[in-house]
Amino acid sequence: MHEALVVERQTSASASAVYRYLTTSADWITWQGSDAELDPQPGGIFRMTMPDGRTARGQYVHLQPYTKVVFTWGWIDMPGIPPGSTTVSVDLIANGDGTLIRLTHSGLTLDEAAMHRMGWEHYLPRLASVAEGQTPVPDLGPAS
């Protein structure tokens, strides 16, 4: 059985600021991971390496500037979720003076969903803070 998990975070940053952190390699690694290769166009590569060396890989599926980013996700070095086998959709929703970031990760088993929820609940606040212009502490991963 496959699950979809939804994690939300409000930020005072604009949707355009948040979007940049989802589509630019150098900006991505300020909030998640130690390395990234992003080609933000449909079919373009999505690759991100975590601080512990695990690498997620997929491809961008859909980009609607400042509104929505969709990419596939999976691990090249972790059994159970092969590269590109799940889908991450990030909606950027105008909300008051800021943006509601709504991340939906679909295609996960129940066990995988629990593990990924812990990760996304760690990383969405980091995304919100860097988009607001704050300097993040070094990324040690969700278990830190």
Image: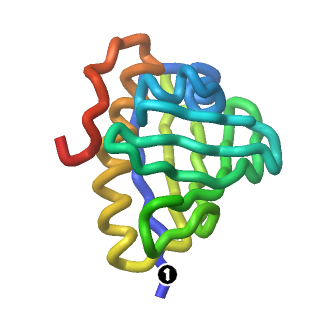
Q: Residue furthest bottom?
A: 1
Q: Is residue 108 left or right of residue 25?
A: left
Q: Residue at x 32, y 19 (%)?
A: 136
Asked whether, in this view, residue 86 is left or right of residue 78, the answer is: right
**Residue 78 shows in the view:** yes
Q: Is residue 15 visible?
A: no
Q: Residue at x 28, y 41 (%)?
A: 141
**Quarter of image, res 93:** top right
Q: Coloured how?
A: rainbow
**107 lies above or below 88:** below
54 left or right, relative to 114 = right
Return the x and y of residue 19 as percentages of the image width and height: 62, 29
Q: Give how far across and how far down residue 35 sits, in percent.
A: 50, 32
Residue 132's spot in the image, x, y percent?
43, 16
Residue at left 17%, top 40%? Answer: 144
The tally of labels here is 1
Label 1 crowding class (10 Å Cα cut-off): few <14, some 14-19, many 20+? few
Q: Is residue 25 above or below residue 86?
A: above
Residue 142 lies, with reference to residue 115, above or below; the image says above
Above or below residue 137? Residue 87 is below
Residue 126, given in percent of the width and then of the height, sits at 35, 30
**Residue type at the position of mark 1:** His
Which residue extends farthest right? 42
Mark 1 lies on residue: 2
Q: Secondary structure at mark 1?
A: strand
Q: Residue at x 65, y 31 (%)?
A: 23
Between residue 130 and residue 51, name the one nearer to us. Answer: 51
